[in-house]
Image: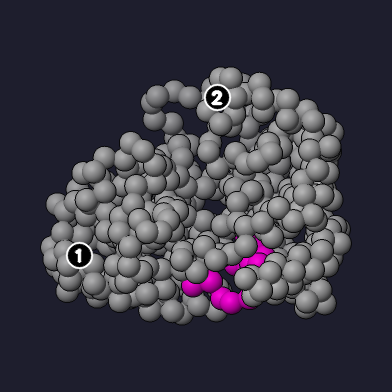
Amino acid sequence: MYPDLQKELDTFVRRTPKSADAHKKNLKRIPLGVASNYRAYDPHPIFVKDAGGSKFRDLDGNEYLDHNLCFGALMAGHCHPAVMKAVEKRLSSGTMFGMPHDMEWELAEEICNRFPIEMVRFGNSGTEATMHAVRLARAATGRDKIVKFEGGYHGLHDSALVSVKPHAPDFGDIHAPTAVPGGLGVPKGSLANVVVATFNDLATVERRFKENPGEIAAIILEPRRRPRYDLPREIHRWRFAAGSFRNAQISDGLDFATQSLSWGDLQHESGFHGCGACDVPRCAFPRKLHTHREAQ
Amino acid sequence: MLSRENYTHIEKLSKKLTDGYRQTVSKSGLQAYVISAGANGALMLYPNEIRNYRDWLAVDADLWRHYWFGMVNRGVMPQPYWWDEQWTISVQHTDPDIEKHLAAFADVAPALARAQQERSATVVAH
């Protein structure tokens, strides 16, 4: 480790002793001391005390400008007055019923007005949303396989936890990436039903369709692989790609569309469709959508 | 809440943040680029455009940790931990918030540039 990095780490440790203590305590009862593996890092994660607006405070009282925002889910920021008002109103009249409630219709209607989709199934997490989307594609097509892109994260279910962050030599040839389990416990049967392509390389997708004629139910991707692998100026390329996927499916006799997910609501009020990055009809939205109706 | 007006507000802040990052990157001599899309964006500590997962594996993780902990120590959580994540701007962020973020980056960037040059020189020497 080089000196300037060590200096910043030393400062971090000095500023956050209560987070270190809380992490040690958590490790006794919670794997990695955190509620999700992605929240774990060395020397210890920051433990939050409270938050409001665009900021949060840690257990040691340090204040931070927050651009984590729950991995992007909190586009409304913390404790937005409209959200507070809506939640407080509901707390006194019940929040969980295990039965239908007419507010479901209100939210479904809002989502369908914003995005070019006709029906909505709600879930509790991104994992659940993409799991349902993949199952729906399989049910509609009678096919088992899906195409996903190496490095793509679509949740933690068996069909998604494949080639998320694989390493050499496991990941094989870049033109035909090997499906690598994202952790122990992913069944071999699930791996066999996920074929992997390389992002920004349409030839690898076409190759997968040729290799698996009549077997692919869906393609799962983020139209922009987060900002990390894509650029806004490439929107047109992805529009082309989406069209090409459709052509590939049509040539394969697949009339059920591909699908995908994700943080489109962070890009545009009508998601990826609205900013022209996507023209496919089945989407999973793992984010919480806070709409203007909350303020009503 | 996620109204057209609020998306416009976020787009304005996003432009201010990415423009400010680009100026600091240029001024500091850091070999990096900045990308953004809507409420999201990221500093890519790599001289070339990342096109896929295997390109991304070449990013210097220690340099990124230097950036992340440096920003956190200056009161800015620039993005979730891990170098494949990105920042999010909320409807409650303000112009002064973005200015604070940029000031922290301007403070960290010279050390990052220096470390990057030294590490590149070491790689070349080996």
* Coordinates of residue A96 in the picture (x, y in percent): 48, 24
Q: On the rendered structure, is A106 left or right of B112?
A: left
Q: Is residue B44 magenta?
A: yes
On screen, residue A212 above or below A238: above
The residue that disc 1 covers is A255
Discs 2, 1: same chain:
yes
Question: What's the amino acid at mark 1?
Answer: Asp
Residue shown at 60%/39% (left/top)? A40
Q: The C terminus of chain A is located in which quarter?
A: top right
Q: Residues within 10 Å of mark 1 (few under 14, many from 20)?
A: some
Looking at the image, which residue is at 16% across and 53% down? A143
Disc 1 chain ID = A
Say which of marks 2 and 1 sits in front: 2
Assess whether residue B99 is covered by the magenta stretch.
Answer: no
Residue found at x 15% / y 59%: A215
How far from the left and from the top, in percent, is residue A97?
44, 23
Residue B67 visible in this rendered orientation of the protein: yes
Chain to which mark 2 belongs: A
Give the extent of the magenta segment: B36-51
Q: Nearer the viewer, residue A184 or A254?
A: A184
Which residue was labeled with disc 2? A30
